[in-house]
Image (tube, rainbow, N blue to C red):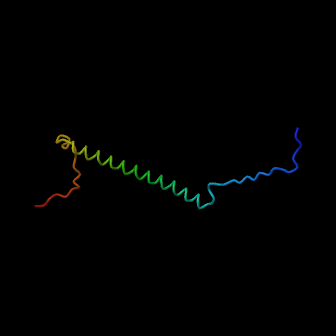
Amino acid sequence: MQAPSSSPIIVRVVERSEVSGLGDVMIQAVGLTGAIAIGALGFGICLASGIIAYRKLRARRMTDADAAQTQSLGLTPTSRE
């Protein structure tokens, strides 16, 4: 058996925080919000492009028989001669 040592062992524990202040938290929050906003904007643009392309293709495929079944709202000006 060993005799106990007379000097104690001292261990210093230093904890480091990744977020050091309110400014860092705000920067991270704005970064996340910006990423979500850019993602939503991109999704909206893609969805709108798809809807517009679908409507244009559908209008091109419309035959004379289909056009006869639709009713004009008279929103376009008529030409005066």
Q: Residue at x 88, y 44 (%)?
A: 4
State the residue at coordinates (55%, 59%).
27
- Name the spot of residue 11 as percent of width and height, x first: 77, 51
- At 52% across and 58% down in the image, what residue appears? 30
Looking at the picture, does residue 11 appear above or below residue 22? above
Q: Is residue 36 left or right of residue 14?
A: left
- On the image, the x and y values in percent for residue 74 come to 21, 54
Residue extending furthest toward the left: 81
Looking at the image, residue 1 sits to the left or right of residue 59; the answer is right
Residue 19 versus residue 58 in the image, above or below: below
Give the quadrant of residue 25: bottom right
The x and y percentages for residue 47 are: 36, 47
Near-viewer residue (53 or 32): 32
Left or right for 24, reference 43 = right
Q: Residue at x 29, y 47 (%)?
A: 53
Q: Quadrant of the C terminus?
A: bottom left
* In this rendering, position of residue 8 left or right of residue 44: right
Along the line of sight, the residue nearer the viewer: 33 or 31: 31
Position of residue 58 measured from the top left corner of the image (x, y, whole percent): 25, 43
